[in-house]
Image: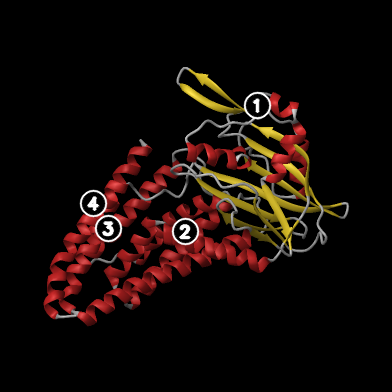
Amino acid sequence: MPHGILTKLHHVFPWALSVLAGLLLLAGSANGHFSEGTKLRTILLTIEDGALHAYVRTPAPLVFSDLVIRSQTQDAPLRSPYLRYETTATGGSYLLDLAGIEADSQAFSKRLAGSLVFSQSGKDIEATVTGFRILERMPDAAFNTADSARAALAAEGTGTDPQFGAAVIDFRIALQAPAPDAAVTVRAGYDPLIPGPGVAIDNHLIDARTSPPVSSTSPGQLEGGADISGSHLATALEFIHQGMVHILEGLDHVLLVVALALGVGATRKLIWLVTAFTLGHSVTLIASFLGLTPGWPWFIPVVEAAIAVSVLYAAVAALLRRSGSILVFGAIGLLHGLGFSFVLGDILGPDAPDLILALAAFNVGIELGQIAILAATLGIVYAVTRLSEPAVRPLRVGALSGIAFLSAWWVVERMMSVV
């Protein structure tokens, strides 16, 4: 590339970064780790009397996803004998119609069975719903072992028509599997709905055919299917993937690591600071699942605001050529570990099967993602240095200024949610 072009680029680039930061600001903040819109579906396999059974705890809209997507795409009302629309003073909402369900429970059971398709060796398994109950909202009671799932089905459901968007359905499926103890694939039986802004869907898959049970996760609505095989290796690989995805999709975490790399460069001190950050977030990630962190309602928003402050600190420190101490980045790691625990906590509870394996693998995934960010940042710096060394400083200042600008906005925005 001609030197003249590079000279122009290194003058223009800081302004371009400022524009980019402004666009990010207008587009909104980075998603927080904890989302009240996270919807969790649990699918548990077990063997009873020599036959394969599945216990499912699901948000009600996933059982009607084909009707919901039709309503969304055609801008038409939801139509089902199991739903009714209630008009209120502030508008209206859909409810599950318990009377309609009771009047034709056999057809409703077929709808439940059709919401998921189980298969072995590429062949679908015949499925029959043998029991269900309807709840007003996601319960706190465990649903992670065969015994807890059976207890859930035996308990009373709601006696009043619940809000459709908040309702939860527990049901049991008898599966005519040719090999009850072999690997099973589960996929969505209906067309997927379009989640609203801020809504995420996760699936907690538990193989209780083994002792102890083996758990894994799969995001989305299972359009592509997910395997339940009882493999600890598959569980570990899935949580490694989840850890990598979380840090790479978490813009605040990414920008912290980028600021750290730009502030220290490829030096021995970078190794020490990254190690301190890693130890810090490992400690609080584990402590959160041992119940050693507060459960106060303001705790999560305060942590999210503090994480934004840590990104702002890292950017300003790098701009001032003050990279910070090992103790400071260890403390920052403690904060970010709490953030990591919030997203993992949306999927796993403290009593989840394979918790130790899941935590360890998730942490490994975070480290791999962190290494990828460091390598990419340092690689870009090296490439620009080789092309035009004078361009490095304005590029560095522009990038760090953009990070400081965006993180300052996050601080203000997240503090507003605290107060």
Q: Which residue is mark 1?
A: 97
Report which quarter residue 212 is drawn in: bottom right
Q: Which residue is mark 2?
A: 246
Which of the two discs, 4 and 1, labels the residue nearer the N terminus?
4
Which of the two discs, 2 and 4, labels the residue nearer the N terminus?
4
Q: Which residue is mark 4?
A: 22
The amino acid pointed to by label 3 is: Ile
| Most foreground residue, 314 or 76 | 76
Residue beneath the point at 29% across and 43% down? 412
Element under disc 4: helix
The amino acid pointed to by label 4 is: Gly
Which of the two discs, 3 and 1, labels the residue nearer the N terminus?
1
User: In this view of the protein, can residue 328 be seen by the observer?
Assistant: no
Q: Quadrant of the N terminus?
A: bottom left
| Of labels 4 and 1, the one closer to you | 1
Report how far apart the C-alphas of labels 2 and 4 lie in the structure: 24 Å
| Of labels 3 and 1, the one closer to you | 1
Residue ranking furthest to the right: 49
Residue beneath the point at 34% across and 61% down? 256
Residue 207 position within the rendered picture, expressed as x and y whole percent measured from the top left: 72, 57
Residue 250 position within the rendered picture, expressed as x and y whole percent measured from the top left: 41, 56
Report how far apart the C-alphas of labels 4 and 3 lie in the structure: 11 Å
Element under disc 2: helix
Q: Which residue is mark 3?
A: 403
